[in-house]
Each structure stands twice: as C-alpha cells, then as structure tokens.
Amino acid sequence: MKNLFIGVDFSKEKVDVAIVFADGLTETAPRVFNEFKTTVSGYKQLVKWVEKNSYGIDPSLWLFCGENTGDYSKGLCNFLYGKGYDMWLENAKSIKDASSLRRLKSDRADASMIAEYAMRNHDRAIMYEPLSESLAQLRELFLYRQMVVRHRCSFQVRRGEKKLTMEKSTIKTMISQSGRHIVSELNKEVEKIDKRIAEFIKSDEELTEVFTIVTSVPGIGTQNAVCLMVYTDNFSRFNYDSRKIACYYGIAPFGKDSGTSVHSDPHVHYMANRQIKAMLTQAALAAVKFNPVMARYYMRLVERGKKKQVALNNVKNKLVHLVTAMVRNRKTFTPEYKISA
C-alpha cells in the first residue's frame, strides 16, 4: 500500500507539486508544496525535494499522480518512468468530478487536490507506460493528418458558403480561387502524409503485423486501423480487454436503475473520445455494407425491432471485440467467422 502521494499540476513552463502523507485514508503529516521548471534539471530537483520531505518512506511506496494534459505531461512522466517511479496519469474529468465541491482554484490547490485524489483512489491506479518509439511517431503522423483534414474541411465549407451568399464580384472570385488553391495544396499534403504512414508501418515488423490483422476485417481501412492502434497501444493498453476498449470509445451502453421510479434502457454515454467514436462509426457503416458477417448481424438486429442507430452501435461493439480478439490471438479475419446476436 502506498503511503506518500505526490500530486502534480502540469503547465507549459512549470509543475506545481503537493505531497500528502497517509496511512490508509488518514493523513499523517501536514501537506507540503513546491514548484519546479519543466526541464530535466527541474525534474531532478523535484525528485530530490520529494526524497528530502519523504520522512524516510521507501520510494516503492510513493505514487506520483497528475492529469493527462498531452504534451505538457509527457516530459515528467517519461522522466519518472525512466527512473523507476510509479506515475499515474489520470483523466482530468475523473479528478474534477471527484472534487466538484471545491471552490478555490489555483495551481497549488490543484496539485493538492490531485494528491488527495491519488490517496483516496490509489487502489485503482494504472501506472504510466510510454508509447513505444514507433507507435509514438505513428501517433504524431496520425494527429498531423487529422489537423490537415480539419483545415481542408474548414476551407471547403467556407468556400461553399461564399458561393451561396456573395454576389459576383472580383472579391468573390479572388476568395474562390484562393480557397481552391489552398484546398488543392492540402489535398497534396494529405497524400504525402498517407504515403509516409504506409512507409512507416512497413518499416516496423510489429506495426505491420497488427495493421495487417486489423485491416483484414472488411470495413476497416487504413485510417481506422491506425486510429485503433495508436489510441490502444496496439490493443495492449487495456490488456486486450475489449470491454474496457469499448467503454473508452464511448460505445458501451450503460443503464440507470434506482428504486422504483428511475429506470432507463442502456444508452451509450456522452463521455468518450469523440474523434475515435466518429471514426469507428465510419468503420461500422462500411462493415455493414461490405462485410457479409456484420451485414447479417446488423439485419438480424433490425428485424428484431432494434432501431438502426442502436443496431449500428452494436456493430461497433462487435468490431471492437472481434479486432481485439484477432490481435490477441494473432489471427486474420475469415468469412466463416460467426457472430451471435
């Protein structure tokens, strides 16, 4: 059981740190606070400061905890992982919801709140592990592509709006030509990124194997496969647990029952990675059209009275369960695969 909990509030140039000493859920000493620069020397000073204020508690009983803030949290997390310390990178909403009655807002107060959260919930902590170098680079390529596609869509929509709303003029012509040129250049950039992604996957044996397995399922294309791979660490992030992956994607239904007055059928929750959820919807639509196994499953559900959107969400779930099992067993898709409804 952990006895020393270090809450870390990440920002661009510094991290605020709070230490909570506890025996179970009982705090055994006053909390202490400090802040450090987001540099390697700053991280070293942080660890030395924790050692100095640890009352001799063994480092194996320490637990660092912070909110997942993307690139801002990556530096310290990788440093602590490399030094052998336990680091828990938790979802920011989970920490916020657990402290919804808090009124004070400051970096120091946030660090203290995170440390207290770690103390009260350390039994379900998931220790941080960095992405492999190949997956990390593939993730950067994927995210860059998503950004370029968003910009392309924005220019396409803007150009279309101007065509409908502006009278003919030299300004309208200039905007239209400029927008067409930008969209054309962004299309070329997307093609370059797609080519680089394909080359990068081929250059790595593990990525190639998983990619081949995932894309063997009719309906799952390159971008859906890459998305699944980078957000699940090649499906190992949740120890190949398809239920947890489905929950993370926001496609696992949850019901509400309380007493005699509250009862509702299971529905998917709004909290999810919406980008992944949208891409999985595309995969499900394609699977229903081009994958005979999924098409039959979808039609059985509709014939039983399921609404089409509910049936489609079931297809998403089946795809996640199917692909996770295939990667775990290192087997590609076969048309003989049967799905029970």
Image: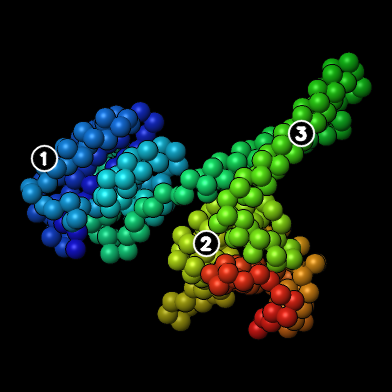
Q: Which residue is mark 2?
A: 235
Distance between mark 1 and mark 2 Cα atoms? 39 Å
Tag 2: residue type? Phe
Q: Position of residue 253 (x, y in %)?
A: 55, 70
Is residue 81 placed above or below 257 in the rendered structure?
Answer: above
Q: Tell me residue 269's x, y (percent).
A: 54, 63
Rendered image: mark on residue 188: 3
Residue type at tag 1 = Lys
Packing grade of label 1 (10 A; few <14, some 14-19, many >=20) is few
Q: Residue at x 32, y 48 (%)?
A: 81
Q: Please name the residue that numbered disc 1 is placed on.
A: 52
Amino acid under disc 3 = Lys
- Residue at 57 percent across and 45 percent down: it is 138
Residue furthest to the top: 170
Instruction: Determine whether the residue tagged by mark 2 lies in a helix, strand or loop.
Output: loop
Answer above or below: position of 260 versus 161. Answer: below
